[in-house]
Image (spheres, rainbow, N blue to C red):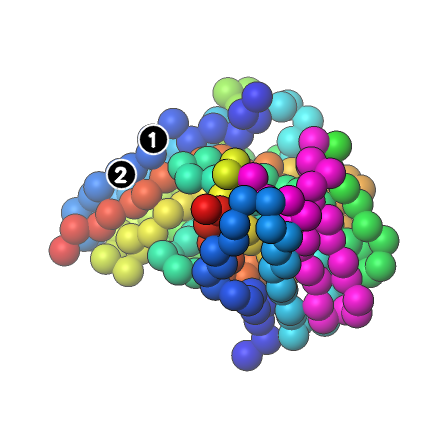
Amino acid sequence: DQQVKQNSPSLSVQEGRISILNCDYTNSMFDYFLWYKKYPAEGPTFLISISSIKDKNEDGRFTVFLNKSAKHLSLHIVPSQPGDSAVYFCAATFFGGATNKLIFGTGTLLAVQP
Amino acid sequence: DAMVIQNPRYQVTQFGKPVTLSCSQTLNHNVMYWYQQKSSQAPKLLFHYYDKDFNNEADTPDNFQSRRPNTSFCFLDIRSPGLGDAAMYLCATSRDTQGVLEQYFGPGTRLTVT
């Protein structure tokens, strides 16, 4: 039972354009969401997060939007750069939970074309 | 640079032959996690240590064990690897399990079972 879903295995965008990566979740108890970025041969690195009390969080070129009623979040990258080409994982958890357990999606491979 | 280190990066073992994967961290974090990621799947938490307290996920097979002899090191032992255990194994750390939810990942060990 996949509680966090990233339905697009891959996405290709042109340099300078917007990249939009989507993530859906099924457990309404999740209250904290994170995006991780992974380059080949490296571990995932934290990118940006959002609490369920917010609907938007921005950090430079990266913005995460949360729609709780739709159980949907998205990561926007503007403008996209070739160095953004990587696998992006969405993860969800329970803030204040006992274990800080992250539930990951399967990832979306973003390719930014020069 | 403070980091999470995993050795070896690639490990080949024979069916049924015990294998140990190693993780070390220079972040001085309290919590260390082990994730299993099979091809095209989401990383899945196997267990974690909070200091010396071991916390097993309910669906982690008994074949998987872990040791944490000190703050810096954590080992994943697979007692009798099967073909289905071939995967990327990711080690991660976090400062705590409460309030600080970002996890720092190592580059992973890719395990092949022949």
Q: Are marks 1 and 2 in contact (CB under 8 Å)?
A: yes
Disc on res. A8: 1
Residue A28 falls left or right of residue B50: left
Task: Please tell me whether mark 2 sits on a helix, a strand or a loop.
Answer: strand
Residue B85 falls left or right of residue A40: right
Q: Nearer the viewer, residue A47 or A4?
A: A4
Q: Are marks 1 and 2 on the same chain?
A: yes
Q: Is residue B17 above or below residue A69?
A: below
Q: CA distance from mark 1 to mark 2?
A: 7 Å
Residue B64 falls left or right of residue A5: right
Name the residue: 39% across, 60% down: A41
Name the residue: 54% across, 25% down: A2
Q: Nearer the viewer, residue B83 or A47?
A: B83
Q: Amino acid at mark 1?
A: Ser
The residue carrying pointer 2 sits among few (fewer than 14), some (14 to 19) or many (20 or more) residues within 10 Å by Cα, namely some
Q: Tell me, yes or no, whether the highlighted magenta stretch contains residue A12.
A: no
Which chain is home to disc 1?
A: A
Q: Which residues are magenta?
A: B59-82
The residue carrying pointer 1 sits among few (fewer than 14), some (14 to 19) or many (20 or more) residues within 10 Å by Cα, namely some
